[in-house]
Amino acid sequence: MRKKQFKAESKKLLDMMINSIYTHKEIFLRELISNASDAIDKLYYRSLSDDTVGLSREDYKIHLSVDKDKRLITISDNGCGMTAEELENNLGTIARSGSLNFKKENEEADDVDIIGQFGVGFYSAFMVSDEVSVTSKAFGQDKAYRWISAGADGYTLEECEKDSHGTVIELHIKPDTDEEKYSEFLDSYRISALVKKYSDYIRYPITMEMETSRKKEGTEDEYETVLEERTLNSMVPLWKKSKSEIKPEEYNAFYKEKFMDYEDPARVIHTKTEGQATYDALLFIPKHAPFDYYTKEYEKGLQLYSNGVLIMDKCADLLPDYYSFVKGLVDSADLSLNISREMLQHDYQLKLISKNIEKKITKELSAMLKNEREAYEEFYKVFGVQLKYGMYANYGANKDTLKDLLLFHSSKEQKYVTLKEYTERMPEGQKSIYYASGETLAKIDLLPQVEAVKDKGYEVLYLTDNVDEFALQMLMNYNEKNFLNVLSDNLDLDTEEEKDSLNKLNEDSDALLKAMKEAIGESVHSVRFTNKLKNHPVCLSSGGAISLEMEKVLNTMPGAGGVKAEVVLEINADHPIAEKLKELFVSDKEKLANYAKILYAEARLIGGMSIENPTELSSLVTDLML
Ligand code: ADP
C-alpha cells in the first residue's frame, strides 16, 4: 500500500514536536482521553435529539489497556468515530492553527507548551510512541478504517474490520533510552495515576483491567492475582457539586490530597460565578506556609480546568503576588483546552476571572477579620508579611485593597490593631499616626521617644518587619491622618509656648550646639535641645524622608549602599546634662568635645545601633573615671 505523506508544514512541525524538548511527555494520555471524551460528547448530544443512536448515558465509556510484552497502550471509546475522510483530514494535517516560528522564539525555554499552542493534541502520542494506529468506525457507517503512522514520514489508511462505532488508538511505546524510560507508561499503576492526575473529572468512566490480589477460592490464606476492571476517574468534580451537598470534611480531604498538606486549610472559598466570566472556583487558604514559601523556588498559581479537564497545574496569572499563598483551582468552560501559557496571558476571560478571584479573596479575608478576629490574627502571623509586600509592590497600585487587612502591634495592650481601629480611637488633638521601628517589640518599647509619645496618651504602632515602614510610607496617610515616625525630628507634641521657649533655647545655644556637631563630625547633621525626653539625656532623630530604620534596611540591600538618613542628636533640655554642657562651653571646650562624642555614642546605643568607634569611646569614658 502506498504511504501517504503528511502535508508539508505538518511534517515539519511533527518532526520538531517529536524531537522537542517538551518535558511533560506524560500529557499524551490526557490529550487522547480528552479526544475520546469529546467524541463521546458528540454522540451523546446527538442521541438527545436522535432516537436511532439508542444509547443511554451509562453506556458510554473509555477503556484503557496495557500490554507490557507487546509494549502497547490501547485507548478505546464508543463515541462518534471517524470516517476515512475524517481520519485523513483530522490526523493527516496538523498545525492547523499555526505558524512555525515558535521553535526559533522558544529555543531557550525548556518547557514550551507546543502541544497546546498548535492544537495538535493527538500528535502528542508520538512523543512516547514509535507507531500509532487509529482504528475507527463512524457512527451510522458500515465500514471501518485503520490509520497507521510511525511519525513524520507519513501514514497509511486502509479499510478494516471493527464491530461497533467508536475509535481504538493503539500506541506502540518507544524503547527506553538513557534519558527517557518510556517503559514507565506500560505500568498500569502509572497509567492509573496519570488518569487521576489529569483526567479525574472526565464525565465518562475511564476503565482499565488492573491486577488485584484475591483469596483463592476454597483456601484459607492463599492468594492469587486476577485482573479486575476498575473505573479510574471519579467523574464528578467536587467543585461542580452544590455547596450544600459538600461536607467540610470533604473539602478538607480534597485539599489535603490535592495540595499535599498535612493540615486542614484555614479557609475554604467555593464560588460559582456566572456572567461575563462563567467559572467555578475552589480556593483554600492554608494554615501554614509551605516550607519553600519565602524562597524564590515557590511557584504561585491555581490549577486551571476547562470543563473538568486539567489544562494547567499552576496558572500564575490567576493570583496576584500578595495572595500567592492561596491554593486551589478554577474551572471554566469558556477556556479552550488547547491554550498555551503565552496565549493565556492575553486571554480576556482569564483576566476577568483573575480580577474576580482577587475580589473574592479580599472579601473573605475582610469577613474573617471582622467576624473571627482570632483566626485572622493566626492567618496574619503566617502570611501578613506577604500582604505588606503587596502594599508597596507595583508602586502601591494595590494599597487600597490591602490597607484594611493590615495589622500592627501597638503600644496599647501590646495587641494587634488595624489602622481603622487606631484612627477611630485617637484622642482629640492627636494629628498623626505614630509608629516606631525596631528589632523586637521589647526594644521598641524602651525607646525614649516612644515614652514621650505614650506620655501624651497617644498610641504607637510597633513595627518589627523590615517592610513595615515602607508599606506605611506607600500609604502616606490613612483617614487623612499622616504617619509619623517617633524618631522624626518634628514630633509636634508640644504646645505653642513650649515650642517657643525651646526655639529660643536652641537659638541662644547656637554656638554650643555647633561646637558639639563639629566634635562629632559627619555622622550627625546637627545637634539640638529637645523637651520630648523625660528621663533619658539624649536620643537620635532623623530629619529627612529616610528614617534611621529605613537607612538600616536599605543598606542591607545590594546596590543601595550609601543611603543616609539625616541624623539629629537631641539633648534633653530638662536634664542636668544640659546645664553641664553650657558650663563646659565656657570653661573647657576640649572636654565639651569629648562629652559630645560620648553622648552621641549613648544615643546610638539607646537607638539599637552599634557604636562607630568603640576604642575611642572606651578611652574617653575611662579618662572620665580617673
Ligand atoms: P483537537 O482535539 O484540538 O481538535 P487533535 O489533534 O487532538 O486536535 O484531534 C484532531 C481531531 O481528530 C479532533 O478534532 C477530532 O475531530 C478527531 N479525533 C481525535 N480523536 C478522536 C476520537 N477518539 N474519536 C473521534 N474523533 C477524534
Image (cartoon, grey):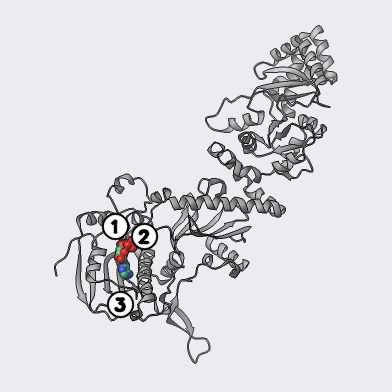
Q: Secondary structure at mark 1?
A: helix
Q: Neighbour class for label 2 at 10 Å: few (<14), some, many (≥20)?
A: some
Note whether 412 is above or below 376 in the view shown: above
* Residue 25: assigned label: 2
N-terminal of the two: label 2 or label 1? 1
Q: Neighbour class for label 3 at 10 Å: few (<14), some, many (≥20)?
A: many
* Residue drawn where x is 19% and y is 72% of the image: 158
* Residue 18: assigned label: 1
Q: Quadrant of the C terminus?
A: top right
Q: Nearer the viewer, residue 419 or 566?
A: 419
Mark 3: amino acid:
His
Q: Which residue is label 3 attached to?
A: 165
**In this image, 129 relative to 208: left or right?**
left
Q: Secondary structure at mark 2?
A: loop
Mark 2: amino acid:
Lys
Mark 1: amino acid:
Ile
Note whether 453 is above or below 50 in the view shown: above
Residue 34 at x, y percent in the picture: 38, 66
Note whether 117 is above or below 139 in the view shown: above
Residue 366 at x, y percent in the picture: 65, 50
* Residue drawn where x is 56% and y is 65% of the image: 254
Tell me, yes or no, whether the two marked residues, 3 and 2, touch with CB atoms within 8 Å: no
